Image (tube, helix red, strand yellow):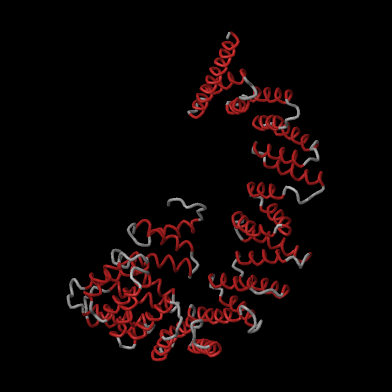
Amino acid sequence: MKRFLMIFFIASVCCSKLFAQNTDLQLAKQFAANGEQQKALDIYQKLYKQNNEDYFSPYFSSLLSAKKFDDAISIAKKMIHKHPEDHQYVIILGTAYIQQGDMDKANVLYDELLKNLPPDQNEIAMLAAQFYQNTNIDYAIKIFQQGRKLLHNDNLFSYELINLYRYKRDKVALTEEYLNFLPSNPSFINQAENAFSTIYEGGADYDILKIELLKRIQKDPQQSLYVELLTWQFLQQKEFDQAMNQALALSRRQNDDGNGIFELCRTLISNEAYDAAIRGYEYLVSKGKDHDLYIPAKIELINTKNLRITSGKYTNEDLLSLEKDYNDLLNEFGKNSNTAFAMQKLANLQTFKLHKLNDAQKLLEETLNIPGIKSILLANCKLDLGDVLLLNNQPWDATLLYSQVEKDYPNSSVGQDAKYRNAKLAYYTGDFTWAKGQLDVLKAATTQLIANDALNLSLLISDNIKDDTSGAALKMYARADLQIFAEMPEKAVKTLDSIDAKFPGNSLADDILMAKARLLIQQKDYAGAVILLKKIADEHSFSLWADDAVFMLGDIYENQLADKEQAKAYYQKIITDYAGSLWINEARKRFRILRGDKNDVSS
C-alpha cells in the first residue's frame, strides 16, 4: 500500500510539472505573439533549464529574436558537445553565426560537414533536409551535389534538387536538372512544362530552354522527348510555324499515327495560327485514305480554311474556293449523318458570305431529312434554316422553325437561343411590343450572352418608343440591323445614314454609332471603329451603349492594336465609371492580367 501511494505521489508530481510546463509554454507563445519578447524569453529560459532537450529550439529562437547571439551560440555548442553525431546542432550554430553577421564562421562549419559527408544515401538526404529546414537552400543543394559525387551516381536526388531549384527560382539549374531527369522519367514532362511556365518570366528565360534543347537534340537526335519540349517551348513563345516544323519532323522520323499533330493543330487553331494548323492537317491527309485520321483531318482542314478566310480580309474567289472544298468533301464522303455538320457549315457560308440563300435553304432542308443526325445538330440546323427563311422574306416560316426548337428544348441553351431569335424576328418586322415581352423573359436566361443581348435589345426598344410611340425611326434602324445580320454592310450604312434625314431629332444617335462601329469591326477596320466608339464614350457617356463602347475599346486595343496601356486604361474606366456594367468582372480580370498581377487580388 505504501509503495502504491509513493508511485501515485510521484506520478502526480510529474503530471503537475508537465501541466505547469505546458501552461508556461502557451504563455510564452502568447507573449511572443504580442511582441513581448523579453517575457517570452524569460519563460523559455526557465523551461530550458528544467529540460534543455525539449525546449532547446524555442529558447534558441527566442535568443536570436532578442539578438542575444552569444547566449545562442553557447547553448548550441553545449548541444553539439552533448550530441556530437547529430549534425542539426552544427547547422543551428551556423545559423547563430549568420544572424550575428559572421558568415565566414558559419561557412567553416558547413564546409566541414560537406568535407566529411559519408557515402550513405540516407545520411546525405537527412543532412540536406536539416539544412532545408533551417532555410539554408544553398547548402542543401551542395550536400546533394556532393552526395552524387560520393555515390558516383548523377541520377540520385533529382527530385529533391528540382524542388530546391524551384524554391530558389534558379532557372538555369532547374532547366538542366529537368532535362537530365526527363529521359528516364518521361511521365514527368507535363510537370516540367508547368514548372517552366511558372518560373520563366519572358523570352530570355525560354531561350535558356531552347538553347539547351537544341544542344541535346544535336547530341541525341533520337530522343523524342527533347523535340516534344522544344515544340512546347515554341508554342509558349507563339512561334507557331516553328512548333509545327518540330512536330512534323518528329512525326516523320517516328512514322507515328499522327495523333500528336492532330492535337497540336487544335492548339494552333485556338491561337488563331491557321496557316500552321493547315500544314498539319495537310500532312495527315497526305498519309492517305487508309489512315485513321484521314477523314477527321480532311474535315478539320476545310474548317480551318473557313476560319482563316472568314476571320480576316478575303476575296470572293477565296469564298468560292472554300465552297468548292466543302462540295468536294460531300462528293467524296456523301451526305450523311457523319458529314451533316459540314453541310451546316457550307450552308452558313452560302447564307452570310456568298448570299446564295436558295442554295443554303435547299442544303439545310436536305440536312434535316438525314436519318440518325444528332439531336443538337438537328436543332441548330433548324435555327439556321429559320435565319435563311427570315433573310429570304419568309418570316412566318422562320418563326415556325424557331418555335419548334423552343418547344422541343425548353430551359436549355438552344431553346433560349430559339426564343431570342423569335424575339429578334419580331423586332426586325416592327412588332416591338411582342419582342420586348419575350426579351424581358430572356433577361433571366441561363446563357449569359443571350441574357446580355436580350437586356440591351429590350432597353433599345423601350428607350426609343417613349417619345415616338409609332416607332417609325426604330423600324428603320431595325431594318439596318437586319442588313448587318445578313452581312450586307453597304446597304446597312445607307439605311443608317437615312434615319437622321427622314426622322430629324430622333433618339438613336448612340445606337447608330454603335451599329456602324460593329460593321467596321466586322470588316476588320479597327482604327475606324475606335473613332466611333470613342465618340460614344465621350459624347454619350450615360447612354445604353456607353459601357459596351468602353469595353470594346479595351478589347480592340488589347487584341487588335497591341496597345496594352490603352487597353488597361479603358478596362480601368469600366471598373471606376461603370460599376454596374455587365462587363465589370471581365474588365477587372483583364485589367489584372495586363497589370501583371500574379494572383487574383482585388483592384
Residue at 63%, 59% (x, y): give it: 190
Could you say where residue 169 lies in the image, as x and y percent from the top left?
63, 49
Residue at 18%, 72% (x, y): give it: 467
Q: Residue furthest top?
A: 2
Horizontal side, residue 120 vs residue 399: left or right:
right
- Which one is nearer the viewer's eye here, 149 or 64? 149
Could you say where residue 498 lies in the image, as x and y percent from the top left?
27, 83
- Above or below residue 187? Residue 403 is below
Could you say where residue 298 lies in the image, as x and y percent from the top left?
57, 82
- Quarter containing the N terminus: top right
Horizontal side, residue 171 vs residue 316: left or right:
right
- Which one is nearer the viewer's eye here, 149 or 565? 149
Could you say where residue 490 lies in the image, as x and y percent from the top left?
37, 85
Horizontal side, residue 6 vs residue 93: left or right:
left
Horizontal side, residue 34 vs residue 219: left or right:
left
The image quadrant of residue 45 is top right
- Which one is nearer the viewer's eye here, 240 or 180? 180
